[in-house]
Image (cartoon, rainbow, N blue to C red):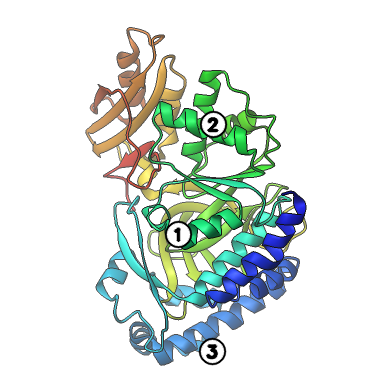
Amino acid sequence: MNDWYTALAAGLLFPLHERLKGHDTVAQRRFLETSQWWQPARLRAHQEARLQALLRHCQQHVPYYRDLLAERGLAPEAVGVADLPRLPCLTKALIRQHQDALRADNAQSLARFNTGGSSGEPLIFYIGKQRVSHDVAAKWRATRWWGVDIGDPEIVLWGSPIELGAQDRLRLWRDRLLRTRLLPAFEMSAPRLDEFLALIRRQRPRMLFGYPSAFSHLARHARARGMTMDDLGIRVVFVTSEKLYDEQRSLIEATFGCPVANGYGGRDAGFIAHQCPAGGMHISAEDIIVEIVDAEGRALAPGQAGEIVVTHLATGEFPFIRYRVGDVGMLAEAGCACGRGLPLLQEIQGRTTDFVMAMDGTVMHGLALIYVLRDLPGVDGFKIVQERLDLTRVLLRTGPEAPTDLEARIVEGFRARLGTGVTVQVERVEEIAAESSGKFRYVVSHVAPR
């Protein structure tokens, strides 16, 4: 099966699958293929109209927002994109508190979902068919930017129990028809990694999809085994759901011989942004409004870093309006060289819990500590956990070339950044466990401000 089968899958099999599920994904993707070239002013007008329609729907059918709009004295037609700060941010705590009131009284066929709680706050929420259609269409569009399509052979390295627990007969047949193979990212022992690499070599996929930490872990294993993986014809590695570090990108690209395309989003917030071949991190602006806000929820200008707040315009049945994602980022001031009118995320710095605080109150990205470990010989793996301002633990996996003074050098480097009074506990471990989702978190702070 060659390109003709990809055309069959993308043009017939997958559209039929979506139609049977009651999704209008195909029509949405065709619209997005055109709207991505609109000028920013036209995209903004489209967002304004969609936002006001969403708020009118919420006023009529969603008790939580009906009460909120009345309390604030806001009419939906008076709220434009620039007026969004007049509405409070939606948090995970508010969703848990008002879950029933956030559900539209005319909602149909809502599916229950949850996040794994990588921010420390697990969440149960609901998604309707419109939201699913729009998110899948946006992801499909971004996939096609890279010269691959649905139906091209794909290997997915994933760890979500939602996907991995749904492998019933129907889903297995669907994946076979679409030539997708799902591998469990939380089963990454050395023997399993050998199996994964052998499978990739045997199947020669055109694209890979999964966590950056999982693929960088797999790439390091391939190099340690002396396995060549850059001659398989893989066109792109799509990564998402975690911060992509520069060294991960370089390692994955060198190992698999193809570019890495970064994606940003979540099960709760939706398909927010995706990188194009020209390098721009394009926001799915037809459906997603991204604000960057300060600690008080006030909008910040492009070029200023702050918390990412998302309004998803296709969530009328269970609205996500000004939802605090829990990540820190920055909007770009300029457009992309590719010519698309979609706005850009200039930078995604990571989760608020990826930031650490020094004894003197200075807040810094966890990279400040990661660099200390990354530059030391013999460090094969690590996880940093800031328990308190005065206590940071380092889980450390080392190789035979680790110097005898390794722990002392770590303590010295960490204290230079966090403060001389900080206790740094270095714990040697055989393995560093992934999260239950299969992700590997390098930095976790229990004291950094959110």
Q: Secondary structure at mark 2?
A: helix
Picture quarter containing residue 112? bottom left
Q: Which mark is residue 197?
A: 2
Residue drawn at x 28%, y 37% is 386
Is residue 188 visible in the rendered image? The answer is: yes
Could you classify mark 2 by the number of other residues whose Cα lies within 10 Å: few (under 14), some (14-19), or many (20 or more)? some
Looking at the image, which is closer to me, 140 or 325? Answer: 140
Q: Does residue 316 lie above or below 280 as drawn?
A: below
Residue matched to label 3 = 77
Query: Which mark lies nearer to you, 3 or 1?
Result: 1
Picture quarter containing residue 127? bottom left
C-alpha distance separating marks 3 and 1 = 47 Å
Looking at the image, which is closer to me, 122 or 111? Answer: 111
Query: Which mark lies nearer to you, 3 or 2?
Result: 2
Q: Does residue 169 lie above or below 15 as drawn?
A: above
Q: Give the image location of residue 275, x and y in percent.
A: 64, 51
Residue matched to label 1 = 169
Check whether the beta carbons of the residues at disc 2 and disc 1 lie within 8 A of each other.
Answer: no
Could you classify mark 3 by the number of other residues whose Cα lies within 10 Å: few (under 14), some (14-19), or many (20 or more)? few
* Residue 148 relative to residue 322: left or right: right
The disc labelled 2 sits on which kind of residue? Leu
C-alpha distance separating marks 3 and 2 = 55 Å
* Residue 278 relative to residue 130: left or right: right
Is residue 284 visible in the rendered image? The answer is: no
Q: Secondary structure at mark 3?
A: helix
User: From this viewpoint, which residue is outermost toward the bottom?
Assistant: 60
Residue drawn at x 29%, y 79% is 100
C-alpha distance separating marks 2 and 1 = 26 Å
The disc labelled 3 sits on which kind of residue? Glu
| Number of disc labels | 3
Q: Earlier in the sequence, mark 2 or mark 1?
A: 1
Residue drawn at x 28%, y 76% is 98
